[in-house]
Amino acid sequence: MTEEGTKILIFYSSKTEPELLTFYADGLAYLREQEIPMNVIDISENKEKAKEMQVKSTPTVILVKNGEQIERYEVVSYLDGILKREELKNIVDKN
């Protein structure tokens, strides 16, 4: 069964990156404001989902549209800005 629409999956580790969600609060707020579903997945607590999505390192951001992976950003550093409001807007808009 195919899921309709766009969803963002954000994989991180609370053991090695506990500040990640605070650092990117503005980008995560943008997703909520736009009503774009997102799943923030702590691989320390959900190893099965990380394995299913073949997440080898964190943070990893995956854009899923209609059940298919469209874009993937691995080892997203804080300097890359992928989880900033404007960058998320650009990623979602182009897909």
Image (cartoon, rainbow, N blue to C red):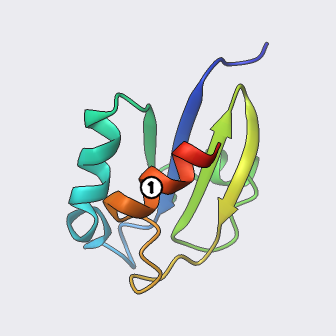
Horizontal arrangement in the rendering, residue 87 relative to residue 46 (left or right): left
What residue is at 73 percent from the left and 28 percent from the top? 67
Q: Is residue 47 above or below residue 81?
A: above
Q: Is residue 31 among the parts visible in the rendering? A: yes
Q: Which of the two residues, 85 or 50, is positioned nearer the viewer here?
A: 85
Rendered image quadrant of residue 18: bottom left
Q: Is residue 42 among the parts visible in the rendering? A: no
Q: Which of the two residues, 26 or 46, is positioned nearer the viewer here?
A: 26
For the image, the number of numbered tags is 1
Mark 1 Cα-neighbour bin, 10 Å: few <14, some 14–19, many ≥20: some
Q: Is mark 1 on a helix, strand or loop?
A: helix
Extreme residue in the bottom direction: 79
Q: Position of residue 49 (x, y in %)?
A: 63, 45
Horizontal arrangement in the rendering, residue 45 relative to residue 52 (left or right): left
Horizontal arrangement in the rendering, residue 31 relative to residue 62 (left or right): left
What residue is at 67 percent from the left and 19 percent from the top? 3
What residue is at 62 percent from the left and 52 percent from the top? 62
Q: Position of residue 74 (x, y in %)?
A: 64, 72
Q: Can you identify the residue that label 1 sits on? A: 88
Horizontal arrangement in the rendering, residue 1 relative to residue 60 (left or right): right
Q: Tell me the quadrant of the picture where the C terminus can be found.
A: top right
Q: In this view, does 9 lie above or below 17?
A: above
Residue type at the position of mark 1: Leu
Rendered image quadrant of residue 1: top right
Q: Position of residue 68 (x, y in %)?
A: 77, 35
Q: Position of residue 73 (x, y in %)?
A: 63, 67
What residue is at 32 percent from the left and 58 percent from the top? 85
